[in-house]
Image (spheres, rainbow, N blue to C red):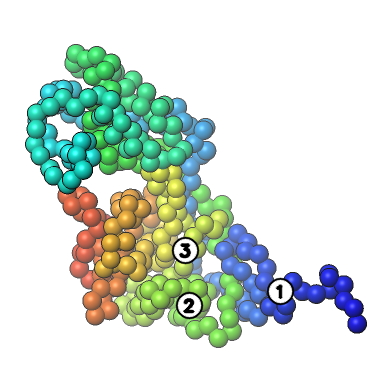
Amino acid sequence: MIQKMGDTPLFGDLPLQSAPDSTGFTNTKHETRYALRDELLLPKALIREELPEIYEIAGDLTTAIAQEFCQSLDLRAELNRRLRRATLNLRDLFLADEQQQTFNVRVSNARIAEKAQLAFRFNDSIDPRLLKQSLITELKRVCDNDGIEYTIDDLRRTIDIAVMRDPERLRTAVRLALRQYLRMSTSEPIPEFEFGSASVLQAKKAAYGIFPSDLNKEERDFAEFIDGDTTGTVKWWLRNRENTKWATRIVLPTGRRFFPDFIVGVTNRSTPDSIALVEIKDDGMTGRLQADANLMKIRVQHQEYKNVFWTYRADQGIWARVRYDDGLNRIVPQGAFKIAEMVYLT
């Protein structure tokens, strides 16, 4: 018998699967629906940090960034760095080796501007030219108010040197400025159900009563760790699904969004709905933990849910808590992760 092309399934007898929806869950004809457990008293929706479109606030935002940045400067000291004694990385400026030297030299304005320019390009939504002009305008205003003599070239050089020497100062200013424009939204409810196989393991404190089948090994083991809490600290937990409309998120200085891995209802935690956020890393003993993206994420807090607890599996299977060390510019261990400590805002 002759079959028409349209009568033959393109992918044979593979199970049919629908496209993902805004819940982040997909359903196939072989999956079971698991309902959100009302008895756990989860909130109807999570609080999400949202920003207006950057083009709507660009001028005001760069002005706010400039104000935050200039407040953190010792202006007289920075303006006096025309002929200065400084420790710079000569590999970056002139040489090809790792040698660090102390020297007296007026590095050219063009060279400093070139190096500083890289620090201005960490947020694709913010025009670096507009940001730099706002910085110059604000620095000029502060100098005029304080009676500090300057030229426009002095201001440009001061900003470039400050940014080149301490790029994190600018990122901190962006983070603080963005806070002024954040909106808290609860417009997207937590889905009433999720899908999983009929054989998925049950979980006592999970929002849907199961361990989601798409958890990676570290996430699964941590979920079992908090699900087994017998102290009464953990009331419920929910996997925070990245890039879904309902999931909570934190706005980063880059303008991107950070979705911590788990949302945990914690007895006596003084945040809305007693919620704590937890980020799981599966690479605590490798250099990947120290990636720039992680170094940025670990320094931010949710406007309402506050600090995010970071943890990874350390020696002998113990969950280690980690924190950011300003002096080292690294993520460092802070002892064992203790469920009871999720009560505290730190």
User: Label 1's element?
Assistant: loop
Query: Measuring 26% from the left and 76% from the top, which residue is drawn there?
Result: 318
Looking at numbered disc 3 in the image, what kind of residue is underneath it? Asn
Q: Which of the two labelled residues, at mark 3 and mark 2, occupies the earlier sequence position?
A: 2
Mark sitting on residue 11: 1
Give left or right: position of 276 versus 210: left
Picture quarter with the C terminus: bottom left
Tell me the tag on residue 161: none
Rendered location of residue 246, percent (x, y): 54, 58
Residue at (35% x, 41% y) in the render: 175
Q: CA distance from mark 2 to mark 1?
A: 30 Å
| Residue denoted by label 3 | 240
Q: Could you tell me which residue is drawn at 23 percent across and 40 percent down?
A: 92
Task: Look at the picture and state if 130 lies above or below 175.
Answer: above
- Give amino acid for label 1: Phe
Q: Position of residue 238 (x, y in %)?
A: 46, 68
Quadrant (top left, top right, bottom left, bottom right) of the N terminus: bottom right
User: Which residue, given by chain and number where applicable, does mark 2 sit on?
Assistant: 211
Q: Are marks 3 and 2 in contact (CB under 8 Å)?
A: no
Tell which of 260 and 5 is nearer to you. Answer: 5
Q: Amino acid at mark 2?
A: Phe
Looking at this view, name the residue that lies furthest to the right.
1
State the residue in front, 251 or 295.
295
* Earlier sequence position, callout 2 versus callout 1: 1
Identify the secondary structure beneath mark 2: loop
Residue at 21% across, 61% down: 332
Q: Residues within 10 Å of mark 1 (few under 14, many from 20)?
A: few
Separation of residues labelled 1 and 3 (CA atoms): 32 Å
